[in-house]
Amino acid sequence: MEHKLSDILLLTICAVISGAEGWEDIEDFGETHLDFLKQYGDFENGIPVHDTIARVVSCISPSKFHECFINWMRDCHTSDDKDVIAIDGKTLRHSYDKSRRKGAIHVISAFSTMHSLVIGQIRTDEKSNEITAIPELLNMLDIKGKIITTDAMGCQKDIA
């Protein structure tokens, strides 16, 4: 059975945003929310099985996907000089798995207050790496003329 790549990506992104933690969770999300998903995708052959989702997603380069996603976000919204971009680091809830010795995930996000939307995000190994990650995040974004806010962690000479 064939499925469109765009449908698989839409399903995966929506499911993960909603808390799905594995391929079967993504498939279950799709079955439960098929009517919603059909508003934005075709899903002509229904929801793909979890093995298909895993196989397709595993072929996608995470760094290329991230780059495409950032470019897509840039194209989807316009911003002017009145936009305030808030930079902040967070540790994602439930991302620590003691049984697998998997540490918590830390991310730095750029939030557009004009659009109430995260316009960029980058993962760091540890909370202390925010200082090096913030410039990398800012380089990915179009911040010319924007007001940028950050907490004390971002108040470094190299960042300013």
Image: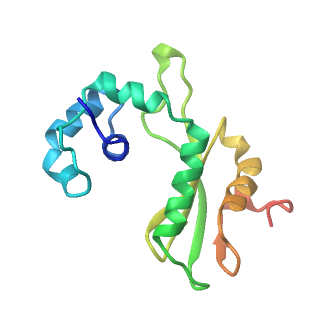
Residue at 76 percent across and 62 percent down: it is 155
Q: 79 left or right of 76?
A: right
Instruction: Tell me how many marks there are.
Output: 0
Residue at 36 percent across and 40 percent down: it is 16
As drawn, 84 above or below 3: below
Q: Where residue 124 sits in the image (x, y, percent)? A: 65, 40
Q: Visible in this render: residue 90?
A: no
Image quadrant assignment for residue 7 = top left
**Residue farthest right in this picture:** 157
**Residue farthest top in this picture:** 99
Q: Where residue 10 sits in the image (x, y, percent)? A: 34, 47
Q: 63 left or right of 49?
A: right
As drawn, 107 above or below 85: above
Image quadrant assignment for residue 141 = bottom right
Image quadrant assignment for residue 62 = top right
In which quadrant will I find the N terminus? top left
Q: 131 left or right of 126?
A: right
Residue at 85 percent across and 59 percent down: it is 158
Q: Which one is nearer the viewer's eye here, 104 or 50?
A: 50
As drawn, 17 above or below 99: below
Q: Visible in this render: residue 54?
A: yes
Q: Which one is nearer the viewer's eye here, 28 or 48?
A: 48
Q: Where residue 49 sits in the image (x, y, percent)? A: 25, 26
Q: Where residue 11 sits in the image (x, y, percent)? A: 30, 43
Q: Which colour scheme is used?
A: rainbow
In which quadrant will I find the C terminus? bottom right
